[in-house]
Amino acid sequence: MCRAEAPDLEQFARTHPDRVRVIGLGTQDSGGEAADFVRDYATYSFPMYWDETFESWAAFGVTGQPAAVLLSTDGDVLGQWRGMFPIDDVLELAAG
């Protein structure tokens, strides 16, 4: 997630808390930059994590940012997008 998409993602998270749980994951920044991002967006409703190892990218086949992965409660991949995710598609898959 980047600063440009963070406000839209926050609005999505606040609008649909009964249908999806949003989790932010940063990878490309330094530890200090990641801490600054979390501090700057501390009022956001979703948790942020930082993966300096890129293991999360490997696990989900992510090749660049921004990217989004929708997981079921069992951890199965329901959808995956490069760039900002299509809200209607996410909600449809989440309802599925």
Image: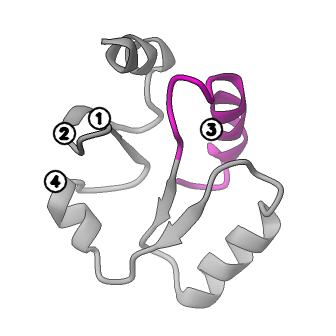
Verify CB contact (< 8 Å) between mark 2 and mark 1.
yes
Q: Looking at this view, is 94 or 89 the one in front?
A: 94
The image quadrant where one finds the C terminus is top left
Q: Earlier in the sequence, mark 1 or mark 4?
A: 4
Verify CB contact (< 8 Å) between mark 4 and mark 3.
no
Verify CB contact (< 8 Å) between mark 2 and mark 3.
no
Residue bearing the label numbered 4: 61
CA gap between label 1 and label 4 equals: 17 Å
Residue bearing the label numbered 2: 76
Side (left or right) of 8 relative to 90: right
Three-letter residue code for mark 2: Asp
What element does badge 1 sit on?
A: loop
Q: Earlier in the sequence, mark 4 or mark 3?
A: 3
Three-letter residue code for mark 3: Leu
| Other-residue count near label 4 (Cα within 10 Å), few / some / many at <14 / 14–19 / ≥20 | few
Q: Earlier in the sequence, mark 3 or mark 1?
A: 3
Verify CB contact (< 8 Å) between mark 4 and mark 2.
no
CA gap between label 2 and label 1 equals: 5 Å
Three-letter residue code for mark 4: Gly
Q: Earlier in the sequence, mark 4 or mark 2?
A: 4
Residue bearing the label numbered 3: 9
| Stretch in magenta | 1-22
Side (left or right) of 11 relative to 69: right
Where residue 58 sits: x, y (%)? 16, 65
Q: Looking at this view, is 94 or 79 the one in front?
A: 94
Q: Earlier in the sequence, mark 2 or mark 3?
A: 3
